[in-house]
Image (cartoon, rainbow, N blue to C red):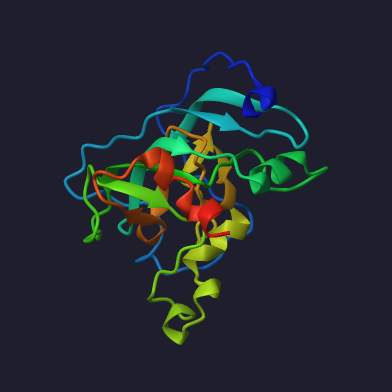
Amino acid sequence: LLLDRVRRPRRNSNRSESRPRARASHEIAAPSRLFGSGPARNSQWRMTPMRAALLEKHQQPLVVVKDIEIEDPGPREVVVKMSHCGICHSDLTMIDLPAGEQLPCVYGHEAAGIIEEVGSAITRLSKGDKVMLTPLPSCGTCYYCVRSEFSLCVEGQSFITGLRADGTSPLSQKGALVYQGFGLGGWGEYAVVSESRAIKVPDDTPLEVACVIGCAVQT
């Protein structure tokens, strides 16, 4: 089904040696201890272009590109190497919308993979862990979570905005911001997500099964 919506890859273009951090025009204030770029703990990770299925225009096929830049994880973020990602009807609905503002965008939110890198403040996850990803996490520490209003979690709002709570995205293309569909962007080779979005699963868990737990099984 998804292949009918994908066009051939475009040729790579030269990328600049440095680029400003991708940021949306409608920035939202958020505590820096939760969000933003930062050095990873004992990091061997380096920003590198990745492949992704990119939605550039609604009601048009996805474009497989090879030049999506991905930031280092922030202190409370992890980099996940995608293993499997489902195709949810919500993703297809967004593709088929007549119009929208969150473009370009990497969709895909029924995802699972392996931790590739962790931020400096991460304590419960380690490189090599198998994880399933959830589009609607609860951090447990924000204004809403401590009042048991978990559905309003600050980190979970990227489900709607496709951005971190500070208005930035870890993804960009030629210096321009790229949205993470439903806060994940699972149709890419990697995803940078908050710690609360990555749920560790037992080592013997098949990732092709774990990937659908984050959305399909719950809904």
Is 56 on the left-hand or right-hand side of 129?
Answer: right
* Residue drawn where x is 67% and y is 45% of the image: 89
Q: Give the percent coordinates (x, y) of residue 215.
A: 53, 54
Residue sitting at x 66%, y 48%: 90
- In the rendered image, the residue lying farthest to the top is 11
Horizontal side of 84 relative to 176 (left or right) equals left
Relative depth, front residue between 106 and 13: 106
Residue beneath the point at 55% across and 74% down: 152
List the single residue furthest toward the bottom: 147
Is 15 situated above or below 87? above
Where on the picture, by quarter, is residue 161? bottom right
Q: Is residue 115 above or below residue 49?
A: below
Residue furthest to the right = 98
The foreground one among 169 and 151 is: 151
Residue 118 coordinates in the image, percent (x, y): 27, 49
> Can residue 74 be seen in the rendering of this structure?
no
Residue 14 seen in render: yes
Q: In the image, is 191 to the left or to the right of 11?
A: left
| Screen quadrant of the N terminus | top right
State the image coordinates of residue 177 (x, y, percent, origin top left): 57, 42
Residue closest to the eye, 184 or 93: 93
Q: Residue at x 60, y 32 (%)?
A: 54
Q: Quadrant of the C terminus?
A: bottom right
- On the rendered structure, is 5 left or right of 120? right
Q: Residue 31: x and y, percent?
A: 42, 69
Count of numbered badges drawn on the protein: 0
Q: Nearer the viewer, residue 146 or 214?
A: 214
| Vertical relation: 209 (above or below) 166 | above
